[in-house]
Image (cartoon, rainbow, N blue to C red):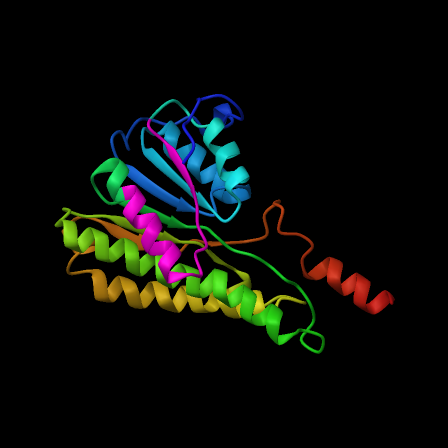
Amino acid sequence: MVPASGRGFRCPPAMAASLRLRGALALVTGGGSGIGRAICARLAREGALVAVADCNEAGAAQTLQGLQAGDHQAWAVDVGCSAGVAALMARIQAHYSRPAGVCVNCAGITLDEFLLKQTEEAFDAVLRVNLKGTFLVTQAAARALVASGAPGGSIVNLGSVVGKVGNLGQVNYAASKAGVEALTKTAAKELARWVWGKGGNGGEPARGIAESAMKPLGLTLGHRYFSA
């Protein structure tokens, strides 16, 4: 656990927001870099207390240093391990005396290669984090909210347009994100009675290609493959 200092990177002025989330507790997996880090910054700017979770403890700590002042915390977690996810939820409950009312599943990896060269290990590794990790965290967050009797909650699972249309060199990533979409739609139906049905919500934004550490993508792979 790392205390926040409130110093470091800042969300661009154009993203300045109201304090509509004042007092809300938000968990963000994959918060140690890229899109996850930006989400953490925005949530903090809107008044939420942010639990930054990432497999890279140093990255999570760096995100924490840049958050607007508040009782934010950072923890290391392997989202593909059920015991690790359970331990994370227990730490959040112990520190804040409540479960996270907002959960953003942003943890994800890419191990890009064309279908003919893709290894079983790389396929399994991507699905373990992107799909199984989203399942484990969604399940644990929903269980915690239901058990607490909270009046509502929000679980957001990040998808990708690649999960809808595919992409060169990303058979594993595309499969994982297609799975996230189906998982999210099913979870929304099952949890409507307890979580979103009480004033909360859930969803899966399907982003396109964004600048982050998860590079190169299909175009670079295609150039490498066909020019070899």
Where's the C terminus, which quadrant? bottom right
Where's the N terminus, which quadrant? top left
Q: Residue at x 52, y 32 (%)?
A: 62
Residue 138, position as x, y percentages in the image: 33, 58
Is 85 on the left or on the right of 214, as rendered?
A: left
Residue 45, position as x, y percentages in the image: 39, 28
- Tell me where the magenta segment starts and ends, as one range: 71-92
Any part of residue 165 in sight: no
In the rendered image of this protein, does residue 222 appear above or below residue 75? below
Residue 73, position as x, y percentages in the image: 38, 34
In the rendered image of this protein, does residue 171 appear above or below residue 103? below
Is 6 on the left or on the right of 169, as rendered?
A: left
- In the rendered image, the residue lying farthest to the bottom is 116
Q: Residue at x 54, y 41 (%)?
A: 33
Is 147 on the left or on the right of 174, as rendered?
A: left
Q: Residue at x 49, y 21 (%)?
A: 7
Q: Nearer the viewer, residue 134 or 94?
A: 94
Residue 128, position as x, y percentages in the image: 49, 65
